Image (cartoon, grey):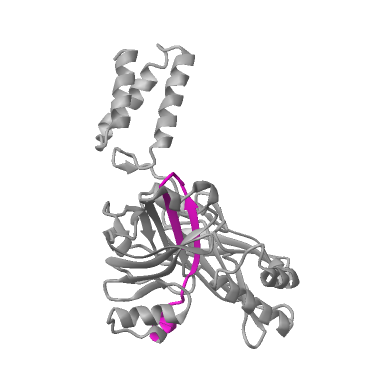
C-alpha cells in the first residue's frame, strides 16, 4: 500500500457512517507501523495529527463498534470511564415541537444513583436565541416517570407534582414517592450554543436512594427559562426506551475483610457504572456543638434546592462557620489490586457530607469516589485520615 492509498483508506473509514470490522482497524494500525520506516517523519506526524483532529471533531462517530463520545454530562472521571466502556445511549432522532421550539434527547445514561441527559433544543426563530446573551437556560417544570409511573425526578415544589398527577389522571401519591425516593440534586448546563440551537445538560443525582430499574421513561417539560426569565411557553413530552444495559445494570458491594478498627461502627461501599458510594459511621472523638449540627442540616437543605453558589450569602455564611468540621476527614481514596488509586469525585455538587446522630456520639461520613465497576478487583483498600489518625481497611467483594 503506497502513501496515497493509505491516506485514502483512512479518510474512507473516518467519513463512513458504518462500523468497520476489527480486522480493518488492525490493518490500518499495521499499515501505519509498517510505513513508519518508509515515510518521512514530518509527513507521518502531519498525517497522524490530521487524523486525530478529525476524530476529535466527530463526537458521535462510531468506529469498529466503539462510540467515540466525550463526557458531555459533567466533569466526573467515573462518567468518563463509563462512557469509554460504552455505557451511554443515543436518544431518539425525533424532535418534539411546541410553540416554535423543538426538543430531543442527544445522549443519556442511568445507573443506581445518576441520570445524565443531554437535550438538543432548537429554536425556529433566531431572535429568540442570541448566543451572546445566554447565561443560564432550563425548563421551568419537569417530571420524569418510568413505565410503572414511578417518579424519577420532579421540579421542586409539591404543586408541580400534584398538579401533574391530577392533570394526567395518574393513580399515585406524591407523599408516598417522597418516602421511597429522595428527590435528587440537580445541575444544568448549556453547551454548543449556535445560531438557533444548543445542548442543554441535566445532571440528576440521588445519593441516598437508588433509582428503580426502568425499561422506559417519559419526560414532561414545561416552559423554557432563559437567564431566570420565561422566554417560551410550551409543553414537550419525550418518550425514551431504555437499553438493556441500563435496566440490567451491575452493582458491586464490598465488605470488610477484618474490621479491627474500634472506632468504625459500620462501613458501606457500593460501586456502580459511574462511581462508588462510600458511607462510614464512626465514633466521635469529641462532643460536637449542637448548633453546628443544625448548620450542617441547613447546608444539606440548600444543596437539595440547588441554592449552593458563590453568590448565595446564606450558604457562604454557613460554610464559613463550619468549615472546620469537614477537615475531620482527609486523604480519602481507594486503591485496587492493580495499584491504581481512585480519589473522591470532582462532581457538579459537593458530594462530601457529614452528619451526626442524635446522641452526637457517632459521626456519619458520605462521599463519592471515582472507582467504577470497570475498575474493580476482588480486593481493594480504603484509605482515609480521621481526626489525624490514618486508616487502611481491606475490603472484599
Q: From the top left corner, tell me how far across and down residue 298 is, in percent.
A: 63, 78
Residue 178 shown in magenta: yes
The residue lying at 29 percent from left, 58 percent from top is 96
Q: Please tell me which residue lies in front, 118 or 159.
A: 159
Q: Which residues are magenta?
A: 176-203
Q: Is residue 33 visible?
A: yes
The reply to whether the magenta stretch includes residue 112 is: no
**197 on left or right of 135:** left
Residue 330 location, x and y as percent? Answer: 67, 62
Compared with 14, 177 (above or below) is below
Count every numbered label the image shows and give the total. 0
Q: Check the picture and name the quadrant holding the N terminus.
A: top left
Residue at position x 67%, y 84% in the image: 361
Residue 315: percent from left, percent from top:
67, 70
- Quarter of the image for residue 167 reads bottom left
User: Is the residue 117 above or below the residue 62 in the image?
Assistant: below
Instruction: Identify the residue at image location x=28%, y=61%.
Output: 240
Q: Nearer the viewer, residue 255 or 32?
A: 32
User: Is residue 81 in view from this perspective?
Assistant: no
The image quarter containing residue 4 is: top left
Q: Nearer the viewer, residue 13 or 307?
A: 307
Picture quarter with the C terminus: bottom left
Frontmost residue, 22 versus 115? 115
Amino acid at each position: 500500500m503506497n502513501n496515497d492509498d493509505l491516506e485514502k483508506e483512512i479518510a474512507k473509514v473516518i467519513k463512513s457512517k458504518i462500523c468497520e470490522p476489527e480486522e480493518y482497524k488492525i490493518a490500518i494500525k499495521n499499515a501505519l507501523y509498517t510505513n513508519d520506516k518508509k515515510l518521512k517523519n514530518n509527513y507521518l506526524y502531519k498525517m497522524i495529527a490530521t487524523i486525530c483532529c478529525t476524530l476529535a471533531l466527530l463526537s458521535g462517530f462510531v468506529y469498529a463498534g466503539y462510540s467515540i463520545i466525550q463526557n458531555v454530562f459533567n466533569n466526573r472521571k467515573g462518567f468518563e470511564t463509563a462512557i469509554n466502556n460504552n455505557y451511554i445511549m443515543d436518544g431518539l432522532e425525533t424532535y418534539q415541537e411546541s410553540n416554535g421550539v423543538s426538543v430531543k434527547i442527544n445522549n443519556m445514561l442511568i445507573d443506581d444513583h445518576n441520570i445524565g441527559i443531554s437535550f438538543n433544543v432548537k429554536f425556529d426563530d433566531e431572535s429568540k436565541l442570541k448566543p451572546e446573551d445566554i447565561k443560564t437556560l432550563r425548563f421551568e417544570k419537569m417530571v420524569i416517570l418510568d413505565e410503572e409511573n414511578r417518579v424519577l425526578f420532579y421540579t421542586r415544589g409539591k404543586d408541580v407534582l400534584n398538579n401533574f398527577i391530577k392533570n394526567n389522571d395518574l393513580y399515585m401519591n406524591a407523599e408516598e414517592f417522597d418516602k421511597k425516593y429522595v428527590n435528587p440534586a440537580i445541575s444544568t448546563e448549556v453547551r454548543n450554543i449556535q445560531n438557533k440551537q444548543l445542548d442543554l445538560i441535566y445532571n440528576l443525582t440521588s445519593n441516598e436512594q437508588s433509582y428503580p430499574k426502568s425499561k422506559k421513561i417519559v419526560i414532561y417539560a414545561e416552559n423554557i427559562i432563559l437567564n431566570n426569565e420565561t422566554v417560551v411557553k410550551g409543553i414537550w413530552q419525550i418518550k425514551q426506551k431504555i437499553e438493556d444495559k441500563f435496566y440490567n445494570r451491575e452493582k458491586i458491594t464490598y465488605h470488610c475483610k477484618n474490621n479491627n478498627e474500634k472506632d468504625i461502627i459500620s462501613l458501606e461501599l457500593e460501586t456502580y457504572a459511574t462511581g462508588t458510594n462510600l458511607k462510614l459511621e464512626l465514633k466521635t472523638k469529641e462532643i460536637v456543638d449542637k448548633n453546628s449540627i443544625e448548620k450542617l442540616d441547613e447546608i444539606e437543605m440548600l444543596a437539595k434546592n440547588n441554592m449552593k453558589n458563590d453568590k448565595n450569602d446564606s450558604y457562604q455564611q454557613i460554610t464559613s462557620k463550619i468549615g472546620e468540621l469537614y477537615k475531620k476527614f482527609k486523604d480519602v481514596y481507594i486503591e485496587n489490586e492493580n495499584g491504581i488509586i481512585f480519589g473522591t469525585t470532582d462532581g457538579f455538587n459537593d458530594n462530601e457530607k457529614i452528619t451526626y446522630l442524635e446522641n452526637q456520639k457517632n459521626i456519619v461520613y458520605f462521599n463519592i469516589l471515582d472507582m467504577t465497576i470497570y475498575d474493580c478487583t476482588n480486593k481493594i483498600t480504603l484509605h482515609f485520615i480521621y481526626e489525624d489518625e490514618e486508616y487502611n481497611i481491606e475490603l472484599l467483594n
